[in-house]
Each structure stands twice: as structure tokens, then as C-alpha cells.
């Protein structure tokens, strides 16, 4: 879903002026397992993944007309209805104000979810004690050159550090991979599965790629080949205690 924007009105503006938000989804049943959640789409992302549908969230430090205080007021009115707030993106770890924003939301009694690719392990370690669940994106094979090429970054080593911190934290989390057939092959998923299993990851998901507007070549068969490969599916089901496909 594309983020909705809470625009400025007559409600107050709080001291959290540092936080920059591109928009919110005010009700979601799919972004925090088993919880009714609101989703905050943080502005800014260091990744340049070719399958991204929210490229408007990529520019760092781009001001928006989202008013953080309005959102907190909204959350106060939804206490007892919504159960959780998920910080998504963009990439939430791009913003130094993330820990304070999480603390404000957590003080209202909400559980906290985080969607991240793990590019800042130090900040990730700071927010881990504050969150209740993490969705950790694995972009491609655990190969530094391939990972950095796909993401247009140099963050592979940091991703590995963050993943190790997440596993050691014993927080509830999942790993997931968007299966873009233009850039991933069946062998890449085997590579990911083997490494995640070695690290001790228990929950993994394959996510179907939805062609971006500029992709006029990928067919349904291309996008679904990962899910119809019986050997791959059997391997993943046998490797991970919790595994599923997301369409």
C-alpha cells in the first residue's frame, strides 16, 4: 500500500520536530504478525533496490508536511482499538530521531514493530530493546559484491552485523526476501536459506515481486518461478520451522 499523509491542521505540533515521516497507513493487518497496527513510513532510504515501489521515500532529509503531533493524537484516540505501531520506510534506521519516536509511541501502550534492512548496526542495537518484533529484509545472496550491487550501496558488512545482533537479542523476528526475477535466481534463494539456517534463523518468507511501472518485461511466470519450484519449496519447508510464501 502507498502511504497516506496526515497533513497539518489545527492540532498541536510537538517537540519531535526532528522526525521526518512520508506518511502513514492508519490500519493494517499484515505488517505486524497477529496485531492490528498503524504503519509509519519513515522518510529516507540509503538502499536503491530495483523492485522498490516507494521511491518517493528515498530522499534523505527531505521535509514533508506530516505533523508528528497529529499522529500521536490519532494514536491516543485509537488506544484499545489498534495494538501496535510499525516503523517502516524508506529505511527507519536512516533517522537519528527514531529511538525517541519509538519511546513516545511505546509510552502510549502500543507494541512496536520495525521493518529494516539493517544498514546501521549501532542505531539498530539502540532501538532493539524498545521493539517487540522485527521484519528484517534480506535483499539477495550473502555475497558482498552482489548485495552491494543490487542495493546500490556498500552496506553488506553492516547488514550482517545487524542480523547477528538481532539473532542474539532473542526478539521475535522474521527474515524475508522479495523475489525479483530480474536480479535473483533460484540458486540465490538456496544461498540465502543455507546462510540463514547456519545463523540460526527460524522464520523465513518469500515475497512475490510486483513489477514496478518501468518493468514491462517480467511476466507472471517469471515472478512465480520461485514458488513453483518444488525442490526449492521442499528445501525451505524442511530448513525453517516457520516458512511460507507471500503473494
Image (cartoon, rainbow, N blue to C red):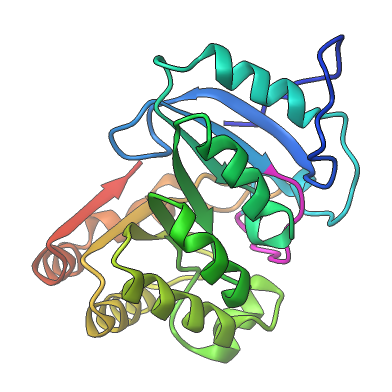
Quadrant of the frame with the C terminus: top left
- Residue 228, image x and y in percent? 23, 55
Residue 138: percent from left, percent from top: 45, 68
Q: Specify whether 241 is left or right of 45.
A: left
Magenta extent: 42-51
- In x, y percent, where is residue 187? 33, 79
Q: Quadrant of residue 76?
A: top right
**Residue at figure coordinates x 28%, y 75% from the top left:** 193
Mostly what secondary structure, the magenta segment? Answer: loop
Instruction: Judge from the rendering whether residue 6 lies leftward or rightward of residue 31; answer left or right.
Output: right
In the depicted structure, whether residue 30 falls above or below residue 178: above
* Above or below for 229 versus 65: below
Q: Is residue 90 visible?
A: no
Compared with 159, 11 (above or below) is above
Above-or-below relation of 27 to 174 = above
23 on left or right of 227:
right
Closer to the camera in the image, 27 or 170: 170
Front-most of 153 and 29?
A: 29
Amino acid at each position: 500500500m502507498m502511504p497516506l499523509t496526515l497533513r497539518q491542521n489545527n492540532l498541536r505540533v510537538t517537540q519531535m520536530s526532528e522526525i521526518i515521516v512520508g506518511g502513514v497507513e492508519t490500519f493494517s493487518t499484515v505488517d505486524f504478525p497477529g496485531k492490528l497496527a498503524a504503519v509509519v513510513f519513515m522518510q529516507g532510504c540509503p538502499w536503491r533496490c530495483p523492485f522498490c515501489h516507494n521511491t518517493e521515500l528515498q530522499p534523505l532529509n527531505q521535509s514533508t508536511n506530516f505533523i508528528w503531533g497529529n499522529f500521536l493524537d490519532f494514536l491516543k484516540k485509537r488506544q484499545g482499538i489498534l495494538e501496535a505501531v510499525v516503523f517502516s520506510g524508506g529505511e527507519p534506521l536512516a533517522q537519528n530521531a527514531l529511538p525517541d519516536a519509538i519511546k513516545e509511541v511505546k509510552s502510549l501502550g502500543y507494541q512496536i514493530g520495525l521493518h529494516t534492512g539493517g544498514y546501521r548496526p549501532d542505531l539498530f542495537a539502540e532501538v532493539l530493546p524498545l521493539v517487540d518484533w522485527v521484519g528484517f529484509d534480506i535483499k539477495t545472496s550473502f555475497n558482498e559484491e552482489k548485495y552491494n550491487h543490487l542495493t546500490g550501496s556498500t552496506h553488506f558488512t553492516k547488514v550482517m552485523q545487524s542480523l547477528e545482533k538481532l539473532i542474539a537479542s532473542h526478539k521475535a523476528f522474521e527474515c524475508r526476501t522479495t523475489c525479483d526475477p530480474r536480479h535473483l535466481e533460484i540458486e540465490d534463494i538456496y544461498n540465502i536459506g543455507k546462510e540463514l539456517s547456519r545463523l540460526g534463523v527460524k522464520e523465513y518468507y518469500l515475497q512475490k515481486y510486483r513489477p514496478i511501472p518501468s518493468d514491462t518485461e517480467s511476466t507472471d511466470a517469471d515472478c512465480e518461478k520461485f514458488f513453483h519450484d518444488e525442490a526449492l519449496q521442499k528445501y525451505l519447508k524442511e530448513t525453517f520451522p516457520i516458512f511460507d510464501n507471500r503473494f
